[in-house]
Image (cartoon, grey):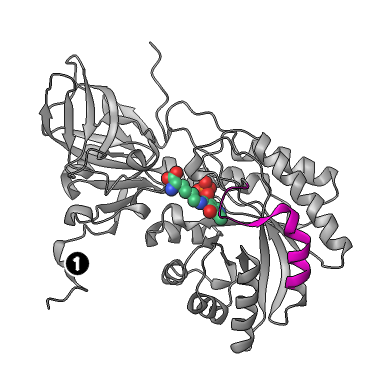
Amino acid sequence: MTSPTLPGAPYFSRRDGQLFVEEMALSALAAQHGTPLFVYSKAAMLGALAPYQRAFAGRDAQVHYAMKANSSLGVLQVFAQAGCGFDIVSGGELRRVLAAGAPASKVIFSGVGKTRDEMRFALQEGIACFNVESEAELDVLSEVALSCGKVAPVSIRINPNVDPQTHPYISTGLKGNKFGIAHDETLSCYLHAASLPGLQVVGIDFHIGSQITSTGPYLDALDKMLDLVQAIEAAGVPIHHLDFGGGLGIDYNGDTPPAADALWALLLARLDARGFGARRLMIEPGRSLVGNAGVCLSEVLYLKPGEQKNFCIIDAAMNDLPRPAMYQAFHQILPLALRTAASTVYDVVGPVCESGDWIGRDRALAVQAGDHVAVMSAGAYCMSMASNYNTRGRAAEVLVDGDQAHIIRERETAQDQMRAERLL
Ligand code: LLP
């Protein structure tokens, strides 16, 4: 039997039966900090960024980390120090970028529902670009910019209507999605933007979906975008930058997405062939930079054999790891220390009072109560989507760099959760 690859290898590895992150045993981190505990590898994050940087060497290009994937300050700091800008979707995310010590000038602001307050704040801080998603938003942004004596740099997000061949909840570039401006309306929208006094058109963007594991959808979307750029420029509106969004998938369980540099070799060849290779290029990767750089450690609380199912009840739940409940997503679940005992097939579930609170179904595990497991590939869209359901405090987070572990978030207490609440 071939065992599936270890997500996050080589930064995560098995040594003498023990799971390691870089130079540290995960069991030591669980013992020291308690569980549930998110553990990230700094080298894995920089290792995921490197193929993008290699692909763009010598180009006028900027990586904007889509921080919705993991917006913890320590994570942002790693990417800021590596030269990344950020793709944000709220005023709160902009405050996080600033708190992490990164400049607003490398921030782009996506999202279909920016409020006037968020626009004003972003304009005052001087972000690089607003990725506008509707005609109505153009009007409001122009008005807000004028009212604060600014000109808002804008890119319009087009919906190229290509199928990214991913989960319907995370495909965003199809006609039925709420995102972007319909392909057919692009030209009129750009002419409208160019006519508004508070706006300066600077770019064009698309983002077709997430966890994309093939190159075809990107190439199709790229061609559609370049056709549009030619039409828009022919109508007299210059486009300075091209932004291709994010979306590149990771290996959760034998998935085989293209490597970032391989994907970009293809896209850059197409850009060069069509005469756009010298344009300013932007991308907004999220998951592919952090997904396999993190795991969630959890303790086995109880084993509960049943007639139809055996349950392995762990101390992490859907509030910590919402992806299985929300998208039927698969995360590998691995014991931190291997046992020689025969394995049993379990549904791995959390303590939350919902049948939907499952982390993995039908998993063969050799574990006992008190053992620890790692939920793999948990660096993206886990902590950033965590909630306090059942008044569960959000987990602590540790960032490992070699043989050093830095706490980047303390475990949330019930007191923290009740801080803003008042009795009658
Ligand atoms: N840019 C825009 C405009 C986006 O909407 C997104 C993600 C990204 C970039 C980054 O995409 P990535 O490189 O991470 O695929 N919670 C879901 C994923 C939602 C993605 C939303 N947009 C999940 O856990 O699978």
Taking 315 as reference, is 67 left or right?
right
Task: Tell me the quarter of the picture where residue 74 sits.
Answer: bottom left
Q: Residue at x 62, y 39 (%)?
A: 163
Q: Which residues are magenta?
A: 175-193
Number of disc labels: 1
- Rendered-image quadrant of the C terminus: bottom left
In depth, the one of 295 and 236 nearer the eye is: 236
Q: Nearer the viewer, residue 290 or 235?
A: 235
Label 1 sits on residue? 416
Q: Position of residue 353 (x, y in %)?
A: 17, 44
Q: Nearer the viewer, residue 262 or 57?
A: 262
48 lies left or right of 278 = left
Q: Is residue 317 magenta?
A: no
- x then y, percent, for residue 34: 17, 47
Q: Residue at x 73, y 52 (%)?
A: 58
Q: Secondary structure at mark 1?
A: helix
| Residue 191 higher or lower than 15, as above or below | below
- Point 20% across, 21% down: residue: 366
Q: Residue furthest front?
A: 176
Amino acid on which disc 1 is placed: Asp
The quadrant the N terminus occupies is top left
Residue 300 lies in what quarter of the image? top left
- Classify 112 as above or below 272: below
From the viewer's side, name the closer residue of 105 and 163: 163
Residue at point 67% right, 45% down?
161
Considering every residue shown, the one lying at the far right of the view is: 234
Q: Residue 365 is drawn in which quadrant?
A: top left
Q: Left or right: 252 with respect to 267?
A: left
Respond yes or no on whether mark 1 lies under 8 Å from ligand 1.
no
- The answer to whether residue 369 of the structure is visible from this angle is yes
Q: Position of residue 88 (x, y in %)?
A: 51, 63
